[in-house]
Amino acid sequence: MNASNQTFSDGQLPPIVRVELVKPRRWWPFVLFVLFCLSALLNLILLVTTAAVVGGSSTGTETFVSGEETSSDKIAIIDITGTIMPPFTERTIKTIDQLIEDDHVKGVLLSIDSPGGFVADSHQIYAKLVKLRQKKPIFVAMKRIAASGGYYVAMGAGPEAKIFAEPTTWTGSIGVIIPRYDVSKLANDYGVKSEPLVTGPFKDSLSPFREMTPEESELWKSIMADSFDRFKGIIDEGRANLTLEQIAPLATGRIFTANQAVAAGLVDQIGFEEDAIEALKSHLKLTSVRVIRHKQPPSLLDALLGAQAKSQPIDPLQQLLDASTPRAMYFCGWQAGMSAR
């Protein structure tokens, strides 16, 4: 007999049983979301903390180049590549500090392939190289280009150093540049006026929306002259064969080919990196030596911050403010300001 036809003894039908489904409470998704956010935050804190530890304690990496792999005596190659600016500057200085303390490093080869960079960064690396050369000899190998700030840091090797340049190297470009653009005519054509509120006549110097006044021109010439005189002074100190009187006609901002640089006394001889290494080995009187390329890799924190920067949307106002910041550069090329990051 079917349940629908069953009756009790008194003739009444069985009571209807209602089954209600229990709905999940609505706050569970919120709890899960909060837990997910907390987990992500903890992971980020752990990642940053680890990056700081790794970045702060890293001793760099050594890559074997040539010589005897089992030798305890080392010649270390430091690469100066690309535009001299942060974060490259900090990593290079850290590498130099480590080589100063490494007693197994008997000599250093500065391998340069750079058009230069910021005045301050070039001098920071130069100053560290001066400290390094007080403990270990430094030779220089110039590659495609070693101009302006690239030549400036080469002077850190000192007057005892030998400077090699490849046959096709470009060097020189001794001078200072502060990028500036004059769009005043374009602004006038489109009815754009710039009227900043300033506290002095030089506060908006280098504004691209108006022509530079004679007074501003003299002011910036004096500022650049300081960096320019320093550049010529470090060449006078770094090249025993040149005097300030001989350097002056070379410091016009012009590029020198390798042969021209040798003839002018800016470079010692034509040769490749391996030729410079052999000359340094001979200078050190080493028969068994391990040649290594020493690099300071980007830390995990650098990578994290770099990834964060890439994910940031482009801010036109920030780019405009960055472009308007005066930057004195030892740089080969008129587009120096476009190299800044």
Image (cartoon, rainbow, N blue to C red):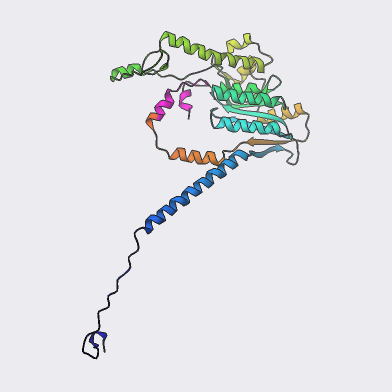
Badge count:
0
Residue range of the region highlighted in magenta in the rendering: 318-341
In depth, the one of 56 and 168 nearer the eye is: 56
In the figure, residue 291 lies in which quadrant?
top right
At 64% from the left and 20% from the top, the residue drawn is: 267
In the figure, residue 243 lies in which quadrant?
top right
Q: Position of residue 296 (x, y in %)?
A: 61, 36
* Vertical comparison of 224 with 285: above or below: above
In depth, the one of 16 and 200 nearer the eye is: 16
- Do we see residue 168 in this rendering? no
Q: Position of residue 25 (x, y in %)?
A: 35, 62
At 25% from the left and 81% from the top, the residue drawn is: 15
* Vertical comparison of 180 with 28: above or below: above
Q: Position of residue 93 (x, y in %)?
A: 61, 30
Q: Is residue 324 magenta?
A: yes
- Do we see residue 313 in this rendering? yes
Quadrant of the image containing the N terminus: bottom left
Query: Residue furthest toward the front?
Result: 10
Residue 329 horizontal side relative to residue 158, left or right:
left
* Vertical comparison of 192 with 50: above or below: above
Q: Is residue 115 magenta?
A: no
In depth, the one of 128 and 244 nearer the eye is: 128
Query: Residue furthest toward the bottom?
Result: 9
Q: Position of residue 45 (x, y in %)?
A: 51, 45
* Vertical comparison of 195 with 142: above or below: above
Residue 85 horizontal side relative to residue 11, left or right:
right
Residue 239 horizontal side relative to residue 145, left or right:
right
In the figure, residue 196 lies in which quadrant?
top left
